[in-house]
Image (cartoon, grey):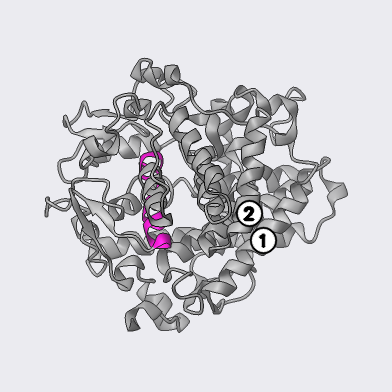
Amino acid sequence: MKDFIMKARLCSICLSACLTFLATGCNDWLDVTPQAQVSANKIFSTPEGYESVLYGIYISMTESNAYGQNQMFGLMDVLAQYYDIYTNQSHALYQASVYNYANGDIRDRIDAMWLNAYNTIANCNILLEHLAGQTSEEFASGHYEMLQAEALAVRAYLHFDLLRAFALNYQDYPDAMGIPYADSFNRKIHPQLTSEEVLNKVVGDLKEAQRLLTNIDPCFDENFKDPIYHFVQPRDNGNIFESYRAYRMNYFAVTGLLARVYDYMGRPEEAYKYAKYIIDKADEGYFTFTDEYDLATDLRYRDVIMQNELLFALDGIDVKQLFYQADAGNNSNYALLDVESLYPDADDFRHYCVGESSSTGNTISYKFYKTDSGSSYAGKIPMIRLSEMYLIAANAAYATDRDEAVDYLTTVRRMRGASQVINSNTYESFLAELTTEARREFLGEGQMFYWYKRHGLPIPRQGAELTLTPAQTCLPMPANEVEFGDRIEDYLNI
């Protein structure tokens, strides 16, 4: 599997170099040279070229300015106050820890997140527009639909995270201006849409992706119930493009993302529907909660990512090196803050996911910790996991069936070996319980800041609570985007 990933990566880097040239900057999308156009036409001359472009799209998401760092354990988790950074003014991310987005270094990181996302979206659109000129008969059975579906789903995933990061919370400000939704490559400047308009397009792309994958996604194969088929072993037919579905936006991942989106929109019936579908698939054996043994074993072989629970992950071949480089520096490491309150229950075996850094002696998350192991658990970037579906279902069910809601949360705690006492007397008390669990589950995964923002909750930090202003909950758009794209940042006026 790793040999294949390396070959695909090398091929895709070359392809992405051409495509990224085509997609550099929203304002330059039409400034395409004839040479670049010829190269693109050559890439899209075979089905294998289309497949390699798709691999390149996923690889671009693993870069350090995207989910390889900033949108995973880096910037977004700094904003969620997981780390002891706010006491160290010399730390590279200190200004982010106090929500000073005007700082030049922090602004550069934010701009890089924006640019990477829209470049990757542009490459999705390039792939989709070239696919539109083909017919499914020119591809192996189901491959045309998978290519189209995954490009749509990645496009939706990236827009949704951009909206959550750069726009006001939808439930509080549904009519506020959001972000541009780039749904074509040829349009030079995409108009900024309201948050509601963006979310409707996200849902539209995801439902179309779901439709395309229905009945043809290899993830429905009975073999997928064997965890080895998630990431490690190819399909029995030897078809590489149909294998390793957990590394791609498969049907289950699309469905799980729909649950996340509807939860964000405050639409519990739809959120419950899609989350419950995944929970039912887990009951059928497609996903399993991680056993304590897999976390308690030697660190070299510890499944700290809990891979059998992942609906979707990226192959972050460089992520451990990025974490290691940051961890080794006094002014760049991710020393955890207040670990005792994170996993206070001694029986909660998630405490095996944190420990001492061999570089600094700090307590850190082991999810991306660099070891000498050749373990198949290494290098995965978790994007959607099973436990989130239980938390979404619990939140959605509370208003209509409190016992069912408690059961979902109880299941998560029981499967982690944690105490199952839950205060569900009021929705506020139950939400506090869900938030505690979410903070334990999402450590290092870039999701917790969005959780606080979506629920309008203060962010805990060392016994205190930080209540953010609307402006502090929104990352600023790049200055050029605002100036030349005529974008509106509504949070500045609240």
Q: Amino acid at mark 2?
A: Ala
Decide if residue 130 is on the left or right side of residue 293: right
Label ID, residue 310: none
Report the number of discs. 2
Residue 365, placed above or below residue 108 = above
Residue 141 image offset from top left, x and y in percent: 83, 41
Q: Percent position (x, y) of residue 402? A: 52, 48
Q: Dominant secondary structure of the magenta stretch?
A: helix
Quarter in which the C terminus is drawn:
bottom left
Q: Earlier in the sequence, mark 1 or mark 2?
A: 2
Mark 2, other Cα within 10 Å: few <14 / some 14–19 / many ≥20: many
- Please say if the residues under marks 1 and 2 sit with CB atoms less than 8 Å apart: yes
In this view of the protein, which residue sits in the foreground, 178 or 316? 178
> Could you tell me the amino acid type at mark 1?
Asp
Mark linked to residue 153: 2
What segment carries the magenta color? Answer: 439-455
Residue 192 in magenta stretch: no
- Specify the quadrant that holds the N terminus: top right
Q: Nearer the viewer, residue 67 or 10?
A: 67
Q: Nearer the viewer, residue 371 or 456?
A: 456
Please check the rendered image and state whether residue 441 is part of the magenta-colored stretch, yes or no.
yes
Residue 267 occupies quadrant: bottom right
Relative to 81, say whether 140 is above or below: above
Residue drawn at x 58%, y 67% is 199
The residue under label 1 is 205
Q: Secondary structure at mark 1?
A: helix
The CA span between labels 1 and 2 is 6 Å
Q: Nearer the viewer, residue 248 or 344?
A: 344
| Residue at 60% over, 61% down | 36
